[in-house]
Image: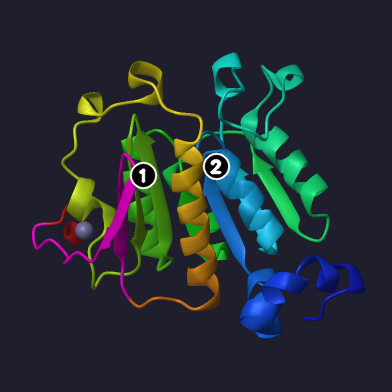
Amino acid sequence: MNFSKDELERYSRQILLHGAEAQRQLKRSRVLVIGAGGIGSTLLPLLAASGVGAIEIFDGDQIEQTNLGRQLIFRERQVGENKAMVAAATLRDLNPHIEVIAHPRHLSHDDADRFRAANLVCEGSDSVATKLMVNTLALAEGRPAVIAALGNTQGHVMLVNGHTSACYACVFGNVDESDLPTCASDGVLTTFPAVVAATAAQITVGQLIGPRPDGQLWLFEKNNCRSISLKKRLECPINAI
Ligand SMILES: [Zn+2]
């Protein structure tokens, strides 16, 4: 797999750092992104600009006026349009050398075949149920998942990678969704989702070009971020699958 002259110029600064083979590995990669909202609207352009060769976007929601204060890939004239469709068009414009597919609907268990076709799955929806579905499908299909969440001034990014280390259900399987802060009920600074999403993008690119053997969790609290390695929970509900 070779690069055109345009691609070589586009990716030149990155190739200086991680080499042409790592850039080829990104070009060979297919990544699913679940959610094109607060997380996805920063994560998606970073993956496209990094040169991830194929990106599939799932989102069944429409752009709302309240999104425009922090979801910077959307414009005022696009309010009411589907987020996945608009995000896909923006990414094709940003990088014409990659393949972008929009799925203008929410993810379901019937999408296991899309997981099988992908190298990695990124999750950035605002639903714990969806995060747990991605966790289950990714483990079942043997694909790593980068799962990101935020509300108010707290957030996290978790890399789920196989059955030997902690999965999302080990850590967040018993969380009651109604107890969690949300951007709609508790507010959020314009800058904070981008901090969490850029971390998720960096972990994703790192995993595609130099896979980590285990999962890991990055925790954000106000202006601090720390990463921790977690052991698999013996009573994890995924064990029963
Ligand atoms: Zn688990």
Provide the residue designation for mark 2: 40
Quarter of the image that includes the C terminus:
bottom left
Is 131 situated above or below 27?
above
Please report the residue visible at 77 percent of the width from the left and 81 percent of the height from the top.
Answer: 1
Q: Judge from the rendering whether residue 229 lies leftward or rightward of residue 119; answer left or right.
A: left
Question: Callout 2, which amino acid?
Answer: Gly
Magenta segment boundaries in residue numbering: 214-235
Please report the residue visible at 66 percent of the width from the left and 17 percent of the height from the top.
Answer: 80
Q: Quadrant of ligand 1?
A: bottom left
Looking at this view, is 216 or 17 the one in front?
17
Q: Judge from the rendering whether residue 120 lies leftward or rightward of residue 159; answer left or right.
A: right
Using the numbered discs, state the Cα–Cα distance from disc 2 to disc 1 in whole angstroms. Answer: 14 Å
Residue 228 magenta: yes
Provide the residue designation for mark 1: 131
Which of pointers 2 and 1 lies earlier in the amino acid sequence? 2
Residue 241 seen in the figure: no
In the image, residue 160 lies at what x, y percent?
Answer: 34, 62
Disc 2, SS: helix
Disc 1, SS: helix
Looking at this view, is 234 or 221 the one in front?
221
Residue 34 seen in the figure: yes
Residue 178 magenta: no
In the image, residue 16 lies at what x, y percent?
Answer: 70, 79
